[in-house]
Amino acid sequence: MRKTTLLFAFFFAIVFSLSAQNLPNKDVVLEKVWKAVGGKSAFEKSRYLEFTFAPIRQGNQSAGRHHIWDRYTGDYRFESTADNGTKTVVLFNVNNKKGKAYENGNLLPDSTSNKIINRAYAAYINDSYWLMSPLKLQDEGVNTQLEDNQEINNQTCNVIHLNFDKVGLTPGDQYWMYVNEKTGEIIQWKFLLQNQKNSSIFEWEPYQDLGNGLKLSVKKTNKESSTSIYFPVAKVLQKVDNNIFTKP
């Protein structure tokens, strides 16, 4: 009996070892992801980012939400236009959420501004993550784990599973990123949002150069719902107008 037990333990150890060998090193995969986006240096030197989050549903593109971000200072400009034509501009800092909000060029009272700033901040968190999630895999509070490789559209993919340590607005969210084993580009992601029972899958279009060598996917599509998250504007700015973060 003891001999049989030892043989079983030895067999299990071999199977476990072979299975582990089939998984690539996580640091190697994360480095591939960084290389595909242009490298950490490309992101670090990209101070000003401009992008417009404009979902497409059933073939109709929304007016979108427009963002300009000074990554070095946290200064932010957020613009949106309501269905009734009201234009909202929010000028604030993402690090302390202090700022001012305007409607059709008119400064709103602080009580109203604070609510709108909170909504603008939530849009910043959501919209920037849709565009820049490959750059945030090693942020503080982000847990990553490799899962078994999968074949997606005849491409072998390393699979990164993400969850969070009470960071962000929805720390219960989970993501699975499918990284092309050869190129390092994320070609698909699956996510299960907190308080939801069903996951969603979006396919990513190939990366584009946004400037400074920074490369990201600007369109992600869910085939089941015919919904795309699209960024018609996504670029690195070399400089901005002096008043961009102070005047509506």
Image (spheres, rainbow, N blue to C red):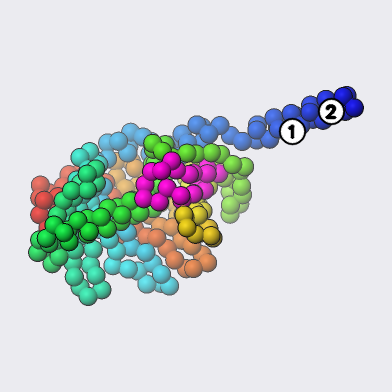
> Residue, x 42% and y 63% (percent of image)?
228
Question: Residue 178 at x, y = what percent?
Answer: 53, 47
Please tell me which residue lies in front, 176 or 219: 176
> Dot 2: what SS?
helix
Image coordinates of residue 116 in percent, x first then y, are: 22, 59
Write the start and end of the magenta stretch as one range. Answer: 159-177
Asked if the magenta segment contains residue 104, the reply would be: no
The reply to whether the magenta stretch includes residue 169 is yes
Residue bearing mark 2: 5
Q: Residue at x 90, y 27 (%)?
A: 1
Considering every residue shown, the one lying at the far right of the view is 1
Specify whether residue 160 is in view.
yes
Other-residue count near label 2 (Cα within 10 Å), few / some / many at <14 / 14–19 / ≥20: few
Q: Which amino acid does label 2 sit on?
A: Thr
Q: Residue at x 49, y 68 (%)?
A: 225
Query: Which mark is first along the chain, 1 or 2?
Result: 2
In space, the residues marked 2 and 1 are separated at their CA atoms by: 15 Å
Q: Which of 101 and 242 is in front in this view?
A: 101
User: Which residue is label 1 attached to?
Assistant: 15
Residue lying farthest bottom? 84
